[in-house]
Image: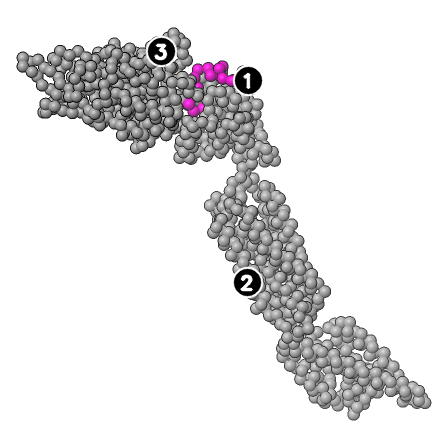
Amino acid sequence: MPVCLDTRLQGTLMPCGHRLPRRMQGWLVDRDMGAGGRGEVVVAGVRDQEALSDRLIDPESQEKARVVVRHSLPVLWIMPLTDNPGRGNLTASVLPAVQLALDDLSRQQTPLRNYEINFHVIDSECNIAKGLKAYFDAICFGPKYLMIFGGVCPSVTSVIAESLQGWNLVQLSFAATTPVLDDEKKYPNFFRMVTSDNTVNQAVVKILQNYKWRRVGTLTQDVQRISEIRRDLTKQLSKADVMVAVTESLSTDPCINVKKLKDMDVTIIIGLFDENSASKVFCCAYSLNMFGGRYQWILPGGYQGSWWEEADSSNCASNNLLTAMEGYITVDFTHLSNRQIKGISGRTPEEYDETYNRELLQRGLVASKFHGFAYDGVWVMVKALTRVIESVRHRERYDIHRNFTVSSKEIGQMVLDSMKEICFEGVTGQVMFRNGERMGTIKLSQFQEGREVKIGQYNAEAEELELNHLIKFQGMQPPKDRAHSQRWDVSVPLYIILLSTTGLAMLMALFFLFFHIKHHNHWVMKKSSPSMNYLIILGTMLACTSVFLCGLDGSLVTDKVFVLLCPIRTYILSVGYTTTFGALFAKTWRVWTIVKYKEIIEKIIKDDQLWIIVGGMLLIDLCLLTCWQMVDPLRRTVEEFSQESFLFVVFQTAPGGEDVNTRHFLEHCESTNLTKWLAIVYGYKGLLMFLGCFLALRTRHAHIHLLDDSKYTRLSMYHVTVMSIIGASGCFLTQYNPNVQLFIMALVVISCCTCTLCLVFLPKLVKIRDNPNQVDPTNWLQCDLNKEDSETSSSSSSLNRGRSLESLRTENQHLRRRITEIGDQLEDVAMQVLEEELSPPSPQGHEVRLRAQVCSEDVPRMNRELFDDINSPEHIQRRRSVQLPILHHAYMPAIGGMSASCSSLLRSPDVPSAQQRHMPPSHRVMVTGL
């Protein structure tokens, strides 16, 4: 078969030796045999014999018509004619392979012996605008092309491939590897000889799965083709459950990007970059000590020949570069088949490679790894067009009509169907397509001692990975995908100690709760707001429970339980704190209110109001926590430390002498906006602590008898505030040391709980022990008054029946006025005694003076003791033994008056006087509230 290749690669559309006819709309063939058996072929619309080069005419009919014409099969070849970055002048490199395929085709007897394939080359320039213009010009003003050959640049090729169906054309590319073209629905008429980068990425994933590498890092060059490969690789890694720890794009200084990989402790590195960038990357890897048994570099795409000898390695010495490169694995499509059998062209892959390299030497060109695919691509087009011609001949023979037309759409569909049925053995292996993709073989190679050694292959059709014994790792075993991870968990002995201490604090709370319930009717308990005391005990027990929960980490519970504990810990600790501090705050607020309104006797603060205060605080607390959990829920977060955190990274030596990197990680309960939520919660609780301390300072000098625990409430509030500030700051500063953080948190909680319980309940325990009587002895004393004191007696009786606070205050002031009046009367008696001293002495007068002297000396002393501590039991006994006789005889002259009262002090207390024995019971009264 004579062939013709237009070698004027300047975008010309002129075929060799033919004047191109105008654009045809279809193929119209008329079969009519004239008289005498001489057939003639009439082609509608063409008057000259040269136009037959654009027709698919049966050669037998031509022979009968005595017309000898070689028919042209035009094919459009789209390639960049200039140097392509990273690939050189690809068109010049593959041109000898195409010519070699056409030469081999001409020596074979095929159905295409009377046809010739004409390639019309246009320059795409790897530019969308220029490439599309050249493409449309060729379609509109050139011949009717049967197929499109070539296509390299992803940007131009993808746009043209998307328009093929509208032009009824089929494109066959031998160098477009981009994964973008894998979409069969979007590019149904696109086929490629070379294996897609998508298949290369599949082989990379298989390697990772084979060695159980689940954590990798990627280092890519920032160009369009490599970016598309990276996106496809990331998707496949995600499907395979392989975590991409870090993705870096090469910058001006590659060492910066390589160092980030080291900082993230990435040991399995996938590199996507060209040869020049590869030399710089490996120089940086050598300087950062990122080579050897702990690291594995994987390079999808691979490089050609001894690329390191031609690449720019001025950053480091050649020996250092080779040292860093040792052991890297390349994953690339197989350039030529390893099976040395003759394929469709009659050549073995080895024979073809020798002939191709000889042609390159004669022309002084550089080899391309796509040359074998271009060679087999020519044979694919020949096979497809042969099937189309046979289909047309079949229709010509058996069509019942004398004239039949083959439209452009039908020709395009025939070519498409023929491409899907292609299957033969070529120099690149078995050629067949599945959804437009070449089902080829991926070769795995490893750099060993200055050369690349094949270590296995990946069969894309069977999706099987085959590795041989030649693979070597520089360590005793394959490198680990990450450092030996060790959880930085809570020390078990420390946790047990804290649990024991917290348990004791909870037992103390339970003891005080039992004590409070047992003595709830005692006057000491009634004076100290019993309901608030219960809340204090409840809050301390909740706070102690949070210590148990905070010590449970991933080493003691599962991940699912850990996630559930995150919000539970926060709720329990926050509610426990608010309950305890809220009760203290409410009691302090009541004292401050009484002090502030001390002139208003009717001011009363009941326990119901205190419940409202504590309930409001808890409601705000719960609303904040619920909003936090709904909007930005707490979740389990694992934080790994980089090698810069030397406190958490330990290098150990394995038994085989290999360095093992031990990396610690922490488990946190964290949310996206954790800092903002903590600021809101801390701000709210800080405001409460500020107000509580302010009220405590304002009431520091107040002493209210009915609220005798206000002093200890203030001390508890001071202590809780100080310890809360210390605990919050300490836990924040030690968040990366769980042992210290838990210790500080537990210490603060236990200290606050125990001190609060002791300050609130221990004084009550002591008072109840000293005064087991449930009735307050300081609120009443019994004395005898005359009938004129019946009003006081009735008031005292009503007090015992439980009068209100205002009645007690009024009665107290009334009794104080009575004491003042009695003192004035005593002074009058003393003046009478002095007057009698001035009169002549007599035995009776001396006795009166003696009694008056005793009485005058006792009265000031009794008044001082009364105002020093009016509630002291000793003073109560003193008043009953001294004041009552004076009051009795001062207001009962009929019984004996002053002398009888004073004389009673000199008698024995066991011998009552006659007047005392005959005193009627109606004059005995109870004086309380002094």
Which is more toward the observer, 911 or 540?
A: 540
Residue under the point 51% across and 18% down: 312
The amino acid type, in three-letter code, at marker 2 is Gly
Q: Looking at the picture, does residue 57 appear above or below residue 523?
A: above
Describe the element under mark 2 as helix, strand or loop: helix
Ranked by sequence position, the earlier of labels 3 and 1 is 1
Ranked by sequence position, the earlier of labels 2 and 1 is 1
- Give the alpha-carbon distance from disc 2 to disc 1, as whole Å: 75 Å
Query: Which percent across, then down, holds residue 829?
Result: 84, 85
Q: Quadrant of residue 823?
A: bottom right
Residue 795 in view of the camera: yes
Q: What range is drawn magenta here?
A: 298-313
Query: Which percent across, then down, holds residue 754?
Result: 64, 56
Query: Which percent across, then down, holds residue 687?
Result: 61, 56
Q: Which residue is mark 2?
A: 615
The amino acid type, in three-letter code, at marker 3 is Tyr
